[in-house]
Image (cartoon, rainbow, N blue to C red):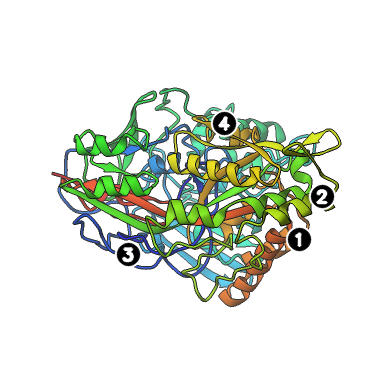
Amino acid sequence: MRRTAKAAIVLLGATMLAAACGGDNKNSSTSSSAPATTSGGGAATSGASTSTGGGKKGGTVTLGYEQEFDSYNTNTSGGNSLKNSIVMNNVTPEAFSFNEKADLVLNKDLMVSAELTSQSPQTVVWKVQPKAAWDDGTPIGCKDFYLEWYSQNDTLKQPDGTTSLFDAVGTSGYEDIDKVTCSADGKEITTNFSKPYADWQSLFGATYGLMPAHIVEKNAGGADVQKAYDTKDMAALTAIANFWNTGFIGQGGQLNPGVMLSGGPYKLGEWVAGQSLTLQRNDKYWGTPGNPDQIVVRFIGATTQPQALQNGEVQIIRPQPNPDLLQQLQGMSGVNVDTYGSFTFEHFDFNFRKPLFQDLAVRQAFAYCAPRQEIVDKLLKPLNPDEVVLNNRLYYPFQTDLFKDNSGGKYDKVDIAKAKSTLEAAGWKLSGDVYTKGDQRLEFSIGHIDPNPRRTNTVQLTIASCAQAGMKITDAPSATFFDDQTGELDSGNFDIALFAWTGSPLLSGSSSTYVPDGGNNKGKYVSDKIQPLFAKILSEFDKKAQASAANDLDTVLWDDLATIPLFQFADMTANSDKVKNVVPNPTQQDVTWNAGQWEAS
């Protein structure tokens, strides 16, 4: 998943949008990533606050990326993945987006303004540019905002009364809006909140772009999206939800140009299954046009990306770093290499659907034998000598005024004896080299995306360590791990999942990862302590009070061992010196955040 610093690796913290995985989550805080430096001869530039701008027009820029796009709708739990947002950043419209400093910046091509006009009751007025329109000529405005609101406010349920009608990745902020009203021309939208929501600028965008409401209407039997919600016409709303949930999913190179419209500087072009997807400049765009005529995203495995860059097959790559890869890239002439701290963190997630992981003693024993320090020492420190084990899921170590180690230091070092005694106190008995309890054996797998050398090494280190604690673990890599709806992570077909969340300095996005039935809650963790704490976090404008609640929440997650954080990512971008203005971004906006400013030589 998904997901501003530049150059050299800097010690930073954690975040979320499934990076090489799937998920919402814009981790929160007021700090941005620390400054970085550049290796390999590249100059660290500040970039710009929008994705398009002046510069040399023309040419093609090719980006090598390891995972293949599969969904236009990044608002769904399955579509919310970095592999999709890296494509959609310049296609679907967003009111605000994150720049290279991790600051939220108003998209002035789309918006005239967005203003908090009252704090009590909280009211925000959004004014859309008069010329803003989808590339089929339909104005962008009221209905698009209206659909975005109720598709994610969790007020609509299926006949069972509990399951949400819309497969939304998260509800934060949208569930706090109790009324949306629009001007006659649909270009001014007023949102009235039932309670304060501090991260209101994250709504209606910030990598979760607006969906074309008129396309949903057309494919939902002609239902009016606004009238259907106002009158609670459940037949119409069900048809709307069904298309919103599944109608924007791509299938093996098949794009529907009448559905997957553009409201940004680029539009979806040719998709060759398993090979590439082309973004073409949107000639109907009313704002500043992008520089490249087209941007090609080639789907290339991380291990072969450097060779493709050296051969000129691609001009930019965005692989997950490892020491050998960094050394290889730094040895290339004419290549700029940026390694930087990002709002992304690696973690183990338990699948609470499985009875084995409903046993707290099993989760604790795994935490005692998981070699987190060894993983950091062997796989991360060669990239960044200052890398540390991460002991917070909401803040990063660089956020010194907010970050706290809430783990109590219990799981920093491998403690095989403690792992065994914890299991035995809970009734587990060693049978041969594996613990058993009744008809259960302490056998399970760790699933992750394939290929990914660092994750393979992480699992192998864990297998070797936890075998000493009577656990039989198998490696379960899969090329389909992050596929929308059908992949192992999204369908719940895993025991323990190893992946990363990537996001931004906003805590609001993290809520869907830990609240019951949250779109990012892949392991189905449930605690009645979580929602009250998130309610405090999301309604609190005072950052110190917000941080206090966030650290209380992280303490609960440590007590329950809902997940096990490992480390904050050191991300990597490398580009040919024949392409200018490639500026890394540490949030889920990622490298394509300013693709319209790239200049091909």
Distance of label 4 from label 3 (alpha carbons): 35 Å
Query: Which residue carries the number 2 mark?
Result: 424
Question: Residue 36: which disc?
Answer: 3
Distance of label 2 from label 3 (alpha carbons): 48 Å
Dot 3 falls on a residue whose secondary structure is: loop
- Earlier-in-chain disc, 4 versus 3: 3
- Disc 3 crowd rating (10 Å Cα; few below 14, some 14-19, many 20+) is some
- Earlier-in-chain disc, 2 versus 4: 2
User: Label 4 is placed on what type of residue?
Assistant: Gly
Distance of label 2 from label 4 (alpha carbons): 35 Å
Is there CB contact under 8 Å for labels 1 and 4? Answer: no
Is there CB contact under 8 Å for labels 2 and 4? Answer: no
- Residue at horizontal 33 percent and vertical 46 percent from the top: 324
Dot 4 falls on a residue whose secondary structure is: loop
Mark 1 or 3: in front is: 3
Mark 2 or 4: in front is: 2
User: Label 3 is placed on what type of residue?
Assistant: Ala
Q: Nearer the viewer, residue 72 or 494?
A: 494
Distance of label 1 from label 2 (alpha carbons): 28 Å
Q: Position of residue 227 (x, y in %)?
A: 62, 41
Query: Which residue carries the number 4 mark?
Result: 487
